[in-house]
Image: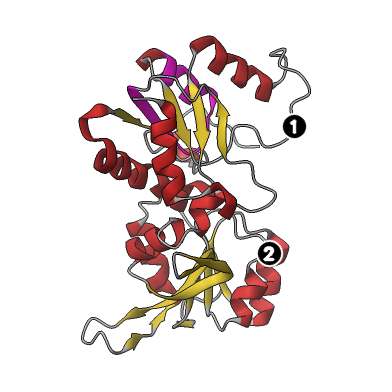
Amino acid sequence: MKLKEILDILENFSPLHLACSWDNPGLLYGNLNKDIQSVYLCLDITNRILEDAREKGVDLILSHHPLIFSPLSTLDGRHLGSSKVCQLVQADIAAYSIHTNFDVVPDGMGKIAAEVLGLAIEKPLEKLGEFQNKAYGIGVIGHFYSEESQNNIEEVPLSIVLDRVKKRFELEQLIYYGSLQKSIQKIALSPGSGKGMSKMAWEMGADVLISGDITHHEAIDALDMGLAVIDAGHYGIEYLFVYFFQNFLQKHFGEHLEIFCESKTLPNQVYHESSNSNAQRA
């Protein structure tokens, strides 16, 4: 199977023209006529991913975040970005990313995350336009239905929302801002980075914003507006990308493609002094 055949299917579902203007998704390295027999799915093309892909003899790495974001002036291998590109070239591994064009598409990241959380979507958090007669944009805003009746919107304390986020996204930790007893009815969900989304969530009547990469100052301002914040981490929610495209590729290409997936390894860890017998008190 040619690389172009795979990309045609991916871009039909998640067109590159829907990506944000600052983004750089698409084919970052590779020949469209290259024969592809195996694909490696990941969020970021790290050194660990590259090493694993080389060992497995992978033909294509399909990542969420683009390996090349800023222009590279050289490919001499001395800097991290150019070094990774050189490794792709040497191993003849194509690299393609589906980033904000997947985040905003109606059946993309926002919808998938909402389904995992059990959130009934009302509309995009930030509407950008329409695609296939559906509104698309960054994130979603919605609510929980009560278990007794699908006609009644559920109102729960922030503590319950925290528990659902932690369990359903299989996270070890969360950072939250707000009272655990705060009543939550309308929920804004923006997978990945939620920088700059709190004011928008508040203006749309949300009681809580669930996202990642929330800065201290933005969280404090959100609290002053009356908006609770749950920071689930950038990686924590967006790992859904791997699950989704594993099923997507299997559905469209079946046994024609061997699919490898990045193991879920949170880049940030929780430090417990008691777990390290050599730890010294400062």
Q: Nearer the viewer, mark 2 or mark 1?
A: 1
Q: Residues within 10 Å of mark 2 (few under 14, many from 20)?
A: few
| Residue depicted at x 46% and y 40% | 266
**Residue 206 placement, left or right of 198:** left
Secondary structure, mark 2, is: loop
**Residue 239 placement, left or right of 46:** left
The amino acid type of the residue labelled 2 equals Gly
Tell me where residue 178 sits by quadrant. bottom right
> Is residue 40 within the magenta segment?
yes
Q: CA distance from mark 2 to mark 1?
A: 25 Å
Mark closer to the chain start, 2 or 1? 1
Secondary structure, mark 1, is: loop
Name the residue that disc number 1 marks: 71
The amino acid type of the residue labelled 1 equals Pro
Q: Position of residue 196 (x, y in %)?
A: 68, 64
Q: Position of residue 161 (x, y in %)?
A: 40, 71
Q: Residues within 10 Å of mark 1 (few under 14, many from 20)?
A: few
Front-most of 104 and 220?
104
| The C terminus lies in quadrant | top right
Q: Is residue 109 above or below residue 156?
A: above
Residue numbers of the magenta segment: 37-54
Per the rendering, the mark at residue 196 is: 2
| Residue depicted at x 39% and y 33% | 5
